[in-house]
Image (spheres, coloured by chain):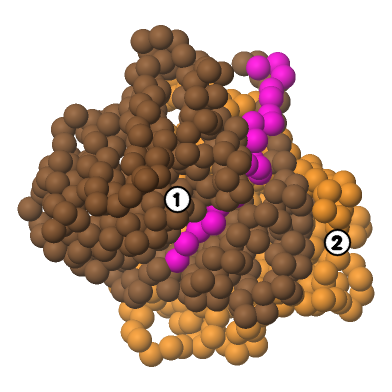
Chain colours: A orange, B brown
Amino acid sequence: MSRVIRLAVIPGDGIGPEVIAEAEKVLDAATASSDVEIEKIRFSLGAARYLETGDTLSDDGLTAIAGTDAILLGAVGGVPGDPRLKDANIERGLLLKLRFALDHYVNLRPAKLYAGVPGPLADPGEIDFVVVREGTEGPYVGNGGSIRTGTVHEVANETSVNTAYGVERVVRYAFALAERRRNRLTLVHKTNVLVNAGGMWKRIVDAVALEHPAVAVDYAHVDAATIHLVTNPGRFDVIVTDNLFGDILTDLAGAVTGGIGLAASGNINPDGTFPSMFEPVHGSAPDIAGTQQADPTAAILSVALLLDHLGLGAESARVTRAAESDIAKRGTTPRTTAEVGDAIARALQA
Amino acid sequence: MSRVIRLAVIPGDGIGPEVIAEAEKVLDAATASSDVEIEKIRFSLGAARYLETGDTLSDDGLTAIAGTDAILLGAVGGVPGDPRLKDANIERGLLLKLRFALDHYVNLRPAKLYAGVPGPLADPGEIDFVVVREGTEGPYVGNGGSIRTGTVHEVANETSVNTAYGVERVVRYAFALAERRRNRLTLVHKTNVLVNAGGMWKRIVDAVALEHPAVAVDYAHVDAATIHLVTNPGRFDVIVTDNLFGDILTDLAGAVTGGIGLAASGNINPDGTFPSMFEPVHGSAPDIAGTQQADPTAAILSVALLLDHLGLGAESARVTRAAESDIAKRGTTPRTTAEVGDAIARALQA
Ligand SMILES: CC(C)[C@H](C(=O)O)[C@@H](O)C(=O)O
Ligand SMILES: CC(C)[C@H](C(=O)O)[C@@H](O)C(=O)O
């Protein structure tokens, strides 16, 4: 009797459909000989869809997605500055809406420098850490507004909302992860300026640390953390941080590990109340869309995170290994998006 | 008849006094044969002072500082985690208090890769840009609080406050600076998430741009900007951004240009209503305080910014040239803080 997994697939915009096509090939190859059956439900969502229909994400769409077991997402977002998207905000209306509505409180973003990958650092050393980015609070809550908008007297505010409930659960996740890794956890915040939010994060990390005596804990201000990321990234194992700082650090981490073409992520609801969502860290890159230049590896490594989350640890490890050995063999001759996906899928069938 | 400049000197904590001693040597040498007389007024402020007296910055102290023509500051802040400083917050109570009270709305932070300086990037190219960081608004306003503090029901908020008045003035400064440089300006924000604050920043930049047709304007999300800083920093000329993003980007910029031992800054009140304040970007580094290991170059280059701000362009240029040629000659043999200061001061006397 096979286990059926209902997977929502949201290819999205730009290079999204191209990288997702390869991610699906790899997913299919990885599960072909298992007793798992993946039932895919496709959702046409994103900037292109908005331009056609005016819809960003309907209540019905959200309910349908919430009813699946997991989500695979490519990338969403139109051409920057497209005047027709001026009032849309696909990011807030679709991507962040999913993350918040589905209570994706852990945004898991591994950063690893794979053998053979050229990066921007002269002497990177070993880089292998994971950012546990909070996903449902902080400056991302959309709790802002403006008055006298468009006049010289405009005041525009944004409020970062942080709760002990929300911080404690993501901090606990990060400690548990550190225990399965190298037992190091770094809190990144800006406690000397954002004294209320930062103070609470610090207190909660200190309190949870008492229950994890094996984990060595330290703290870095976000500005100093960016310095460490380019001068000594090897010092990090697990970083736990808020939504905005995590956004910034993970793009930088992607860059120092050879580009966000390799950076995978999971938006995870660890409680299992809602489906978790897996997506490459990169955006929709409309400038190269349709040209088969996009690297599908980040999407494929996101499939590995997806499989692991679904309890398919062996399949996840096989995808990771296949992707890593493909990365290690890469020369300087560019391959198409499909060629990379085919090579990794083929390695799994072998 | 000589012009008298009343200079507040705040050596501060840790390596602050050491680097300021060298900055003063250089300032004295640079102005020795000019018709300017620098009258120095010393202020003992910082974590050490707080531990002695319980004072962070008194009203009288602030008034006295506000009455000077300019301020030279080393670094403030005690040993991280010192329990006696738990309730002090020297950063908010002293450094940010000065920046806000003295309306330092331009935080000017040049980033330049000097010839001969080893940095972390394999192929940095030419790096020469300036970050114009807003200094009196945004997430730094201290507009936060928490309820049910210390309980599982705690809610801790931080509000970023942004005004058209505050944004427009710093944006105008940045455009004028771009016109004196390479005519490029990049706005960095996170408009897709912080739609209210980011939207206002974007609208104001677009409006002011119409008055500066020679300046090419672009925009980068803060996360993407960190990628550019490590993969293609040469693309930047002038970056204008808010207080928090500017804090993060300038530490990263310091790192990619060979370390914050070289990064100078000015907290500027362009209107001249209040004295401007010049300080190295680095902190008080208590771990190496008193060991003469600190590099005074950032403090010395801050003196160049100070001289320029005071209208002493020729003296400023001489300090910059002397510091740059000292940097270019540096070998791998370490010199003491005083040796570096002496060498640069001597070059000015020659
Ligand atoms: C597109 C944007 C809203 C998003 C974010 O800021 O979270 C992206 O940058 C990311 O990191 O996934
Ligand atoms: C010490 C701290 C408050 C300060 C800041 O965040 O502005 C520092 O990091 C800086 O960049 O000058």
**Which residue position holds label 2?**
A57
B18 vs A111, left or right, is: left
Q: Where does the N terminus of chain A fall, quadrant-wise?
A: bottom right
Q: Chain of mark 2?
A: A
Q: Which amino acid, mark 1? A: Leu
Which residue is most to the left? Answer: B333
- Is residue B141 on the magenta stretch? yes
Of the pair A41 and B269, the residue shown nearer to us:
B269
Gap in angstroms between the C-alphas marked 1 and 2: 56 Å
Q: Position of residue B302 (x, y in %)?
A: 36, 49
Label 2: few (<14), some or many (≥20) within 10 Å? some
The residue that appears at 76% across and 43% down in the rendered structure is A157
Query: Residue A28 falls in which quadrant of the image?
Result: bottom right
Q: Which amino acid, mark 2? A: Leu
The residue that appears at 76% across and 56% down in the rendered structure is B200
Which residue is most to the front? Answer: B1
Q: Position of residue B191 (x, y in %)?
A: 71, 59
Magenta-highlighted residues:
B129-149
Q: Where does the C terminus of chain A fall, quadrant-wise?
A: bottom left
